[in-house]
Image (spheres, grey):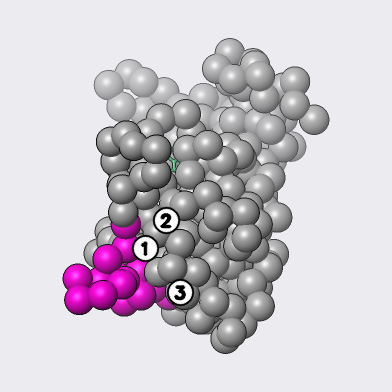
Amino acid sequence: MRIDIITVAPELLNSPFQHSIMKRAQEKGLLDIHLINLRDYGLGKYKQVDDYQFGGGAGMVMMVEPLMNAIKDLQQQRDYDEVIYLTPDGMQLKQNISNKLSLKNNLLLICGHYKGIDERIREHFVTMEISIGDYVLSGGELAAAVLVDSIGRLIPGVLGDETSALLDSFQDNLLAPPVYTRPAEINGWRVPDVLLSGHFAKIEEWRMEQAYQRTKERRPDLLDEE
Ligand code: 6GU
């Protein structure tokens, strides 16, 4: 999968993909992330990318032309399955959205800044609008990093069987059960006996039960979703 990200702050997105699973996904050739600096498409001597909003009010708006020229340039090189604008008024990111996006070939992400982007870009180029939650970030970059991470780990072949993403919290609408590692006892705190029993069926049953109980306590809303 190739993911292109249009941003005015590429520095913000350099480090997040250079570690752990995202790094491995790229090394395996399963994920190819490209950062496009919107400033390269800026207008005039000062490479302007934003301007005052019509109608007045504080805050700048990202202009049509730099974004349009960047998007058109990229679209000439490949067909995108989705052009995704990261914005707090988009639909809230959920596991099932990441699951679906992980099967695509080419994604184009647009990070907003300031007051956001000119509405005409949203009308004419954007095919999906995603928010990562009900709080405001200074820009879409951190949200893009979250989205790419959640998608990247799902790309077939990125995770081995032993770490299968299908066992994660939220797959099946359940939170993950508690986990333990050595030592089996410390300060009198014991790991639940069943996990030391070697009885695989019983362990699975315990984990399912724990996942269900934990979800019921912490996120009962998940149990109502289909
Ligand atoms: Cl996608 N962008 C910004 N700026 N803030 C957010 C967000 C996105 N999702 C939640 N808050």
Compared across the picture, whether 11 is left or right of 6 comes to: left
Q: Are discs 2 and 1 less than 8 Å apart at CB?
A: yes
- In the depicted view, which residue is nearer to us: 15 or 75? 75
Q: Residue at x 70, y 55 (%)?
A: 100
Q: Quadrant of the C terminus?
A: top right
Compared across the picture, whether 170 is left or right of 14 comes to: right
> Mark 3: which secondary structure?
helix
Mark before the other along the chain sequence, 3 or 1: 1
What residue span does the magenta drawing correspond to? 34-50
Q: Considering only vertical position in the picture, is 59 above or below 46?
A: above
Mark on residue 147? none
Location of mark 2 (residue): 111
* Circle 1 residues within 10 Å: few <14, some 14–19, many ≥20: many
Location of mark 3 (residue): 70
Mark on residue 7? 1
Q: Name the kind of residue labelled 3 in the image.
A: Ala
Q: Considering only vertical position in the picture, is 108 above or below 45?
A: above
